[in-house]
Amino acid sequence: MRPRDLKLPDERHPEKAHRPDNAQPKKPKWIRVRAPGGAGYQDTHKVIREHGLATVCEEAGCPNVGECWAHGHATMMIMGEICTRGCTFCNVATGKPQALDVFEPGRVADAVQKLGLNHVVITSVDRDDLEDGGAEHFAQTIRAVRHRAPETTIEVLTPDFLKCPASALETVVAAKPDVFNHNLETVPGLYPEVRPGARYFHSLRLLQRVKEIDPAMFTKSGIMVGLGEERQAVLQVMDDLRAADVDFLTIGQYLQPTPKHHAVAEFVTPEDFAAYEKAAYGKGFLMVSATPLTRSSYHAGDDFARLRAAREARLAGV
Ligand code: SF4
């Protein structure tokens, strides 16, 4: 069988074949990544395969996979590899998902222990077919990791639970992840074309509710730039996130996975990323990561340690 990443776009995404083709522009010189390979990468690959797990690193075609996996850092993607939404930036397949695997939380926990992770990021596809959006499965996975690897800090990157009862979010928060992350992904004006199944103010409110339920829980969100957004709109997103009391903001360059995905409107320069980072700190975020290769889970473990230190310093009035 050909490896997943060697499949042609129409083979990988037959459900996206009706979309128009968007040419994929050449990447600028500041977007250079380490090629996957080496002993560390192979070890991570082996653990993931042996435990029958999916990762967003592979499913999203993340450019950082060579670097992250060399250090054993993989972001677990639970509840299958098929998403019920069809966001135009996302490389994950859209369709009818399979039934939940009740043994998956245990396998995630085993893999976390085997990889010796200090910090794990757990995400999922959207499961609009489930009444609770998969909230209980998230909670079970958090509890399984806590049991098997009590020293590991846990970050969840969840769907928006758009059509779920309020108890869905409460279920995830009650399982006490260390960081609750939900990405806004883009500015509100681009939602209809980039994230058509989602609602900007619902996602914002979700993050705000996490802080209301558990004020001690760190909250985090991220957007991609280069999708055609105006700078002013990005600054407004920062204000909205601060109004929702979000602690940590990530901003990274959108990269187009295939011609069937949203076109790259521009490659934002490293200088403009630095300006976004400065503006975000000025608006009061505890932590900001804004570089072309920033992804929600990129260096998430190191960032978590810095996030904790930043909160302690703020509380101490330093
Ligand atoms: S940045 Fe996140 S998704 Fe990308 S390879 Fe690293 S851990 Fe995986």
Image (cartoon, rainbow, N blue to C red):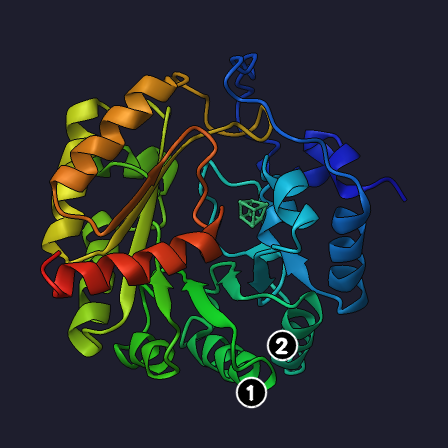
- Identity of the residue drawn at 55% across and 87% down: 147
- Identity of the residue drawn at 63% across and 40% down: 67
Q: Name the residue under label 2.
A: 109
Evaluate if marks 2 and 1 touch, with contact meaning CB atoms under 8 Å apart. Answer: yes
- Identity of the residue drawn at 81% across and 66% down: 50
- In depth, the one of 107 and 273 nearer the eye is 273
Q: Does the residue labelled 1 lie within 8 Å of ligand 1?
A: no
- Give above or below for 155 relative to 257: below
Q: Position of 274 compared to 15: left or right?
A: left
The type of residue carrying mark 2 is: Ala
Q: In which quarter of the image is residue 206?
A: bottom left
- Identity of the residue drawn at 40% across and 60% down: 159
Kindly tell me whether residue 95 is visible in this rendering. Answer: no
Q: Where is residue 106 in the image (x, y as percent from the top left)?
A: 65, 81
Kindly tell me whether residue 253 is visible in this rendering. Answer: yes
Q: Position of residue 295 (x, y in %)?
A: 45, 42
Image mark for residue 147: 1
The type of residue carrying mark 1 is: His
Q: Quadrant of residue 259?
A: top right
Q: Position of 222 compared to 206: left or right?
A: right
Q: Where is residue 41 in the image (x, y as percent from the top left)?
A: 75, 48
- In depth, the one of 201 and 27 nearer the eye is 27
Q: Distance between the residues labelled 2 and 1?
A: 8 Å
What element does badge 1 sit on?
A: helix
What element does badge 2 sit on?
A: helix
